[in-house]
Image (spheres, rainbow, N blue to C red):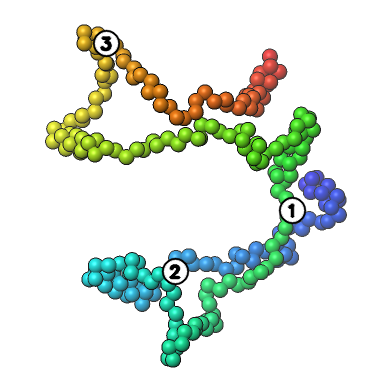
């Protein structure tokens, strides 16, 4: 309440809220029109769809494929191309109650103003201009890891597809799962368990060991450390 009283004195304006006048002044006119986004179809529309489906089934072609690729002009009895406009209905249920009404402007969002002010303070403290969205900044902070597009869902080979199908059929027939739950160690010719690694192909085309920008410790972590130090 004290904040409201202080703001009223500063702005030289009395805050009025909840009265009939204030409700009328700040009434949202857009809510006066209730739109039905899923109206029920007319019987003639339902009949038309049914006839289209029957014709498509009989002819073996969809009307979507056979649709005209250009406009079908409306012609008069003299074969002269004219365009007839249907008269606007007197009482259109979808016509909005009011258009081009004024919308109140409450100014900038306080969070945005606070952020802009914080940026300005930070620039003065560190004597550094915050630059974002330019070509140089995009090149400097470019995430190189995104230059390599990995295919996590490659198309399966035909042999793999057949193997999966055969495995499913065998599992259904035998009533057991073919998935091995234990590790299968790789052994050499003497039976000794060893692990063979594949040689490096030497054909890597993606970028590796690229520098990653260091933005410092997370602010929450820094605050937590400072709080612990203060408590200690």
Work out whether mark 2 precedes mark 3 in sequence or the reverse, and give the earlier one.
Answer: 2
At 53% from the left edge and 72% from the top edge, which residue is drawn? 94
Q: Is residue 135 left or right of residue 47?
A: right
Q: Is residue 31 left or right of residue 180?
A: right
Q: Nearer the viewer, residue 145 or 204?
A: 204
- The residue that label 1 is drawn on is 107
Q: Quadrant of residue 44?
A: bottom left
- Residue 155: where, in percent of width, then height? 32, 40
Q: Quadrant of the C terminus?
A: top right
- The residue that label 3 is drawn on is 193
Q: CA distance from mark 3 to mark 1?
A: 73 Å
Compared to residue 201, the image places residue 119 above or below, namely below
- Residue 220: where, in percent of width, then height? 63, 27
Residue at far bottom of view: 78
- The residue that label 2 is drawn on is 39
Q: Is residue 196 visible?
A: yes
The numbered disc on residue 116 is none
Q: CA distance from mark 2 to mark 3?
A: 71 Å
Q: Is residue 231 visible?
A: no
At 82% from the left edge and 49% from the top edge, which residue is drawn? 7
Disc 2 on helix, strand or loop?
loop
Disc 3 on helix, strand or loop?
loop
Q: Are marks 2 and 3 in contact (CB under 8 Å)?
A: no
Q: Quadrant of residue 197?
A: top left
Work out whether mark 3 precedes mark 1 in sequence or the reverse, and give the earlier one.
Answer: 1
Disc 2 crowd rating (10 Å Cα; few below 14, some 14-19, many 20+) is few
- Residue 164: where, in percent of width, then height? 22, 36
Q: Nearer the viewer, residue 91 or 219?
A: 219
Compared to residue 200, the image places residue 66 above or below, namely below
Q: Nearer the viewer, residue 34 or 111?
A: 111
């Amino acid at each position: 309440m004290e904040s409201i009283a202080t703001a009223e004195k500063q702005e030289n304006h009395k805050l009025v809220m909840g009265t009939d006048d204030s409700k009328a002044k700040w009434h949202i006119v857009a809510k006066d029109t209730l739109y039905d986004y899923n109206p029920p179809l007319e019987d003639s529309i339902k009949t038309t769809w049914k006839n289209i489906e029957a014709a498509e089934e009989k002819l073996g072609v969809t009307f979507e494929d056979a649709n005209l690729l250009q406009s079908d002009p409306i012609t008069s009895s003299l074969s002269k191309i004219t365009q007839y406009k249907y008269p606007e209905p007197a009482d259109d249920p979808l016509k909005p109650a009011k258009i081009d009404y004024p919308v109140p402007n409450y100014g900038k969002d306080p969070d945005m103003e606070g952020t802009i002010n914080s940026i300005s303070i930070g620039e003065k403290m560190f004597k550094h201009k915050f630059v974002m969205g330019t070509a140089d900044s995009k090149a400097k902070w470019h995430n190189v890891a995104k230059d390599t597009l990995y295919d996590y869902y490659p198309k399966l080979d035909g042999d793999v597809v057949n193997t999966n199908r055969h495995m499913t059929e065998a599992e259904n027939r035998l009533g057991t799962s073919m998935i091995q739950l234990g590790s299968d160690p790789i052994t050499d010719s003497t039976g000794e368990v060893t692990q063979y690694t594949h040689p490096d192909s030497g054909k890597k085309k993606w970028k590796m060991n690229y520098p990653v920008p260091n933005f410092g410790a997370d602010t929450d972590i820094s605050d937590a450390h400072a709080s612990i130090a203060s408590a200690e």
